[in-house]
Image (cartoon, rainbow, N blue to C red):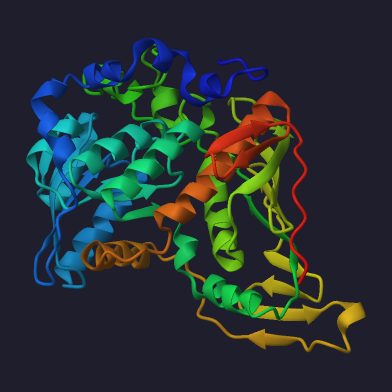
Amino acid sequence: MAKQSGQSETALSRREVVKTAGALAAVGAVGTDWSALAGTSLAAPRVVGANDRIRIGLIGPGGQGTAHLRNLVAMIKDKQINAEIVAISEIYEPRKARAKALTGAQIYHDYRKMLAEAKLDACWITTPEHWHAQMALDAMDAGCDLYVEKPLTRYLDEANKLYKKAKEKKAVIQMGAQACSDEIWHRAHEVIAAGEIGRPVWSQTSYCRNSKGGEWNYGIDAGASPDNLDWKAWLGPAPKIPFNKDRYFRWRKYWDYSSGITSDLFPHRISPLFIAMGLDYPTRVVCTGGIYVQYDREVPDTTHLVADFDRGHTMVVAGSTCNEYGLNDMIRGNKMNMLLGANITLQPERTWADDVEGRSISVAPRREDLRKMERNFLDCVRSRQKPYCHIDLAHKVMVTIALSEISYRENRVVGFDGEKMKMVRGATPTPSPPKV
């Protein structure tokens, strides 16, 4: 396991194996001659006409990937979307067979070959987190718009590269944080922007679960082996270790592929708060916690994130996989509190009760609708508009998540310089907001 304190940013963000092996090793891991695919670097997203079918590919039809495929197949059948699933890439033979039976699409072992041959308009990336960045970069070079499951990338430097590439390519990116589609957050933004709650001083949210068997202890296929699972390709840019079923099927428990609660669960809660408050990059982040109950993992089962922002706001996020009693969604202003439940409730602070009036705002039910996110993405592939969880939002959320992991593992306060796109170590004070 990698050292957890005193690491350089590069060491934590990319691992020793990436520094020594380089990008070409990742190409070799899946057995592709990159020189044969070099022409894809010249591609740009194709303009899809109103009547054109969007050509879809997907990399990684595991649990979430298969959920996307089932939705897409159903929406195509019901003529809710004008699209076709033309290609899927997977390195585990049983999942190849399942994806083929579900979609009828062409199945590729090597995702780079799929990108080079399939002439895709849009690509879903639903792999473990440690592959998100390289696959996204390659897909954009092949001219694809992207639906990338959360988190955007595994590490901070990868997120910066992906963000830069997306801007250069003018690619449409949707990160899979479904709550971003719920009306409540967009209405909350309108209320806050209008100044109704005063200055939003701090917000709170949480993602808490509990299970006797331990979070992410998914079932393990008895028949999985190096004979039907390309372990070298699956590891890719991660450290090279012998075949390990627990790491393949339960990868979210291990630092090499995930940061657990912060990368799997927190994006669902942090992303909509960014929408509600229109936040920029965090200036200071600290993350605490530990493994208190579930000792079969490397990532913490309890973690708390506190992030400061340059307009004078603090976000508090609690997470647990061994206690399900979390914090209610709430944004606290100096004049009124905003409670975000089934509806939006504005509750005056006692000292401002004679000056402001509380009220309740009805909104559509909170559903975290996956199909709505998928349709929104495909609509934006045509219109070139920003989807619900667009690249600017996704990058800010990813920076917050990445800083929280670094803070936890290095036991220090860290920040971010949004102009230089660079992490800052140490407890740099958050600048005071302008007077209003």
Q: Nearer the viewer, residue 317 or 221?
A: 317
Q: Nearer the viewer, residue 248 or 385?
A: 385
Q: Is residue 157 visible?
A: yes
**Whole-percent x and y of residue 416?**
61, 40
Check the picture and name the quadrant holding the C terminus.
bottom right
Residue in the picture at 58% in, 73% down: 189
Q: Is residue 335 above or below residue 211?
A: below
Residue in the picture at 43% in, 33% down: 158
Residue 195 quadrant: bottom right
Residue in the picture at 68% in, 86% down: 360
Q: Is residue 277 above or below residue 238?
A: below
**Whole-percent x and y of residue 402?**
56, 37
**Whole-percent x and y of residue 102?**
17, 51
Q: Is residue 300 visible?
A: no
Q: Nearer the viewer, residue 192 or 42?
A: 42
Horizontal placement of 334 versus 171: left or right?
right
